[in-house]
Image: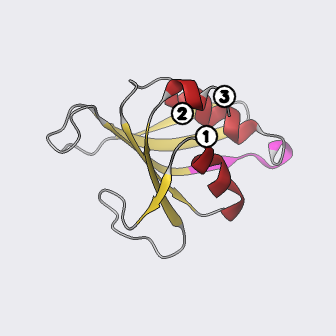
Amino acid sequence: MEFISKSYTYLFGEIDYCYFEKEEMYPDGLLVFMGSYIYMPYRGQGHYKEMVRTLLNMFPEGTVFQAPVENKILVPMFKRMGEQIVEKIEYWGNPQNCKVMQGIINKEIINNI
């Protein structure tokens, strides 16, 4: 797999990610969040959820989505999207400072969070 990091930037902050299209292990694609940052004036206002929703809608339904979640306040949001805590994330293994979440993009669920 070719590892190419990209960034989704919006008024409120940015999310760094990698997307692997139709790889052998992930025939419907793999989206890995690499990190994110919400600018200080916009924190606690739901803008991160809005950015995640927008970014996930840019990828095909059925894509495997992995996210290391350092902020424990965000874990319930990812669980509402159908994500589960797993042992490892592709390329990183098991980062010690976060929960590793994984799920499959389902746009109906994502758009209703």
Question: Which three-letter amino acid code belongs to the residue tagged 2?
Answer: Tyr
Find out whether residue 38 is within the magenta segment: yes
Mark on residue 8?
Answer: 2
99 to the left or right of 88: right
Upstream in sequence: badge 2 or badge 3: 2
Location of residue 86 in the rendering, given as x and y in whole percent from the top left corner:
42, 62
Q: Residue at x 40, y 25 (%)?
A: 61
Circles 2 and 1: CB distance less than 8 Å? yes
12 to the left or right of 86: right
Q: CA distance from mark 2 to mark 3?
A: 21 Å
Q: CA distance from mark 3 to mark 1?
A: 22 Å
Upstream in sequence: badge 2 or badge 1: 2
Report which residue position mark 1 lands on.
14
**Outermost residue, left side:** 24
Secondary structure of the residue carrying tag 1 is strand
Location of residue 24 in the rendering, given as x and y in whole percent from the top left corner:
14, 40
Numbered disc in front, either 2 or 3: 3
Q: Residue at x 36, y 59 (%)?
A: 89
Binning the other alpha carbons within 10 Å of mark 1 as few (below 14), some (14 to 19) or many (20 upward) gives: some
The one of 87 and 19 positioned closer to us in this rendering: 87
Secondary structure of the residue carrying tag 3 is loop
Mark on residue 84?
Answer: none
Mark on residue 112?
Answer: 3
Q: Quadrant of the C terminus?
A: top right
The one of 66 and 33 positioned closer to us in this rendering: 66
Q: Which span of residues is magenta-colored?
A: 36-42
Location of residue 1 in the rendering, given as x and y in whole percent from the top left corner:
18, 44
Question: Which three-letter amino acid code belongs to the residue tagged 1?
Answer: Glu
Numbered disc in front, either 3 or 1: 3
Location of residue 14 in the rendering, given as x and y in whole percent from the top left corner:
61, 40
